[in-house]
Amino acid sequence: MSGKVLRYLIPILLLLVVAGSVQAMTINSFQFTYDQSSDRFQLEYEFSDPVNDDGEGNDIVWVALVDCQGSVVGYDAVNMNIADGAVNNVVTNFPRTAVPNQPVTGRMVSAELYDTPPYNTPPPASDPPDDFYSILQQFPLKAVSTADLGAGFPDCPPGWQPKQPDNEQGSNDQPSFKDGRLNMDPGAPIVIYQVGDTFQVYQVTSPNSAVIVLSLSLPDLIALEVPDHNLEVAHSDDGTVVVYKLTSGELYVGTTPNAEGKKYVCLFSLDPLKLIQNFNEAG
């Protein structure tokens, strides 16, 4: 049975106030793309097994379009009437400018598909509440697909990564980040890079953004004599990140204690630059 697309580009989500259990669904494919020549988004879904039934024969899932700066640029709802064991494919194509919930502020935009509970009446096409995205995030994130809008849009913050579906989060203790960072552990309060001859430290300010707090010359760090006591080389303006050259010749990068009283620490060898270990220690 063919699916129907409900185009609520600027919706309000009334469904979430209605109690109901979330039913299982299987996602065979989920792809979000952007065509620069036409300035259009495309979402393609393929589901099997029942999704969420609103009691009136409509199966609903919701997608949030979120850019790498954290702006929620729009929403999409898919209405699929699907029988047990059936497979359904839906393609929806729409102009980027047709989703003006918030302006696009970063070149990478992710489509995040949430398995929301049933609702009794379709939501009206009106402005969403401010907490719409935070409400969506209370439900299982079933699939994510990311599109690159190109150089005409602002770059993403260093260290940005799209979300992972809930069934994939935590599946790998050392995920393979692809942005060149030297410390690979998820949830780190700082992210460290080598950019040419520069050693850079970024402080994470939210899951989708970070700000540079230190930029040091790597040749100068290497040339600095091994001290007879641990020597402070630099610290961030607010004092929350500090760099030492140790008596071992290694480079220490650490944070001040967090709310749990723990410091985050990275140790590097310098020539060549290489992460030796990173860990949390009591402050």
Image (tube, grey):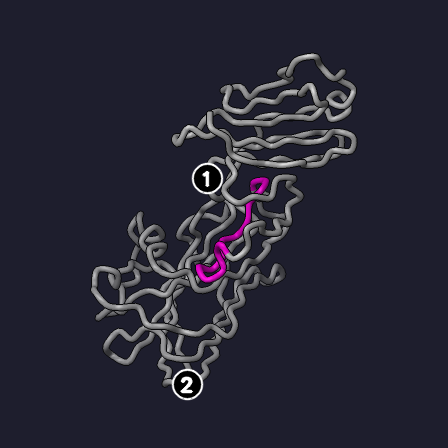
What residue is pinned by disc 2?
85
Which residue is pictured at 49% across the width and 20% down the height? 238
Q: Position of residue 108 (x, y in %)?
A: 56, 51
Question: Residue beneath label 1, please?
Answer: 206
Task: State the extent of the magenta-drawn residues as a range.
Answer: 157-170
Q: First in sequence: mark 1 or mark 2? A: 2
Residue 277 picture location, percent across and down: 63, 36
Q: What residue is rendered at 21% in x and 64% in y? A: 18
Amino acid type at circle 2 is Gly
Q: CA distance from mark 1 to mark 2?
A: 41 Å
Give the x, y percent position of residue 280: 51, 34
Q: Position of residue 170 (x, y in %)?
A: 49, 54
Relative to 88, is 215 on the left or the right?
right
Q: How many marks?
A: 2
Closer to us: 114 or 109: 114
- In magenta stretch: residue 166: yes
Instruction: Decide: is 17 above or below 176.
Output: below
SS class, disc 2: loop
Q: At 69% across and 26% down in the image, what residue appears?
A: 250
Name the residue at 40% across, 59% down: 75
Q: Horizontally, is 121 left or right of 172 in the view?
A: left
Examine the rendered structure and indicate whether residue 266 appears above or below residue 230: below
Q: Nearer the viewer, residue 228 or 62?
A: 228
Identify which amino acid the numbered label 1 is placed on.
Ser
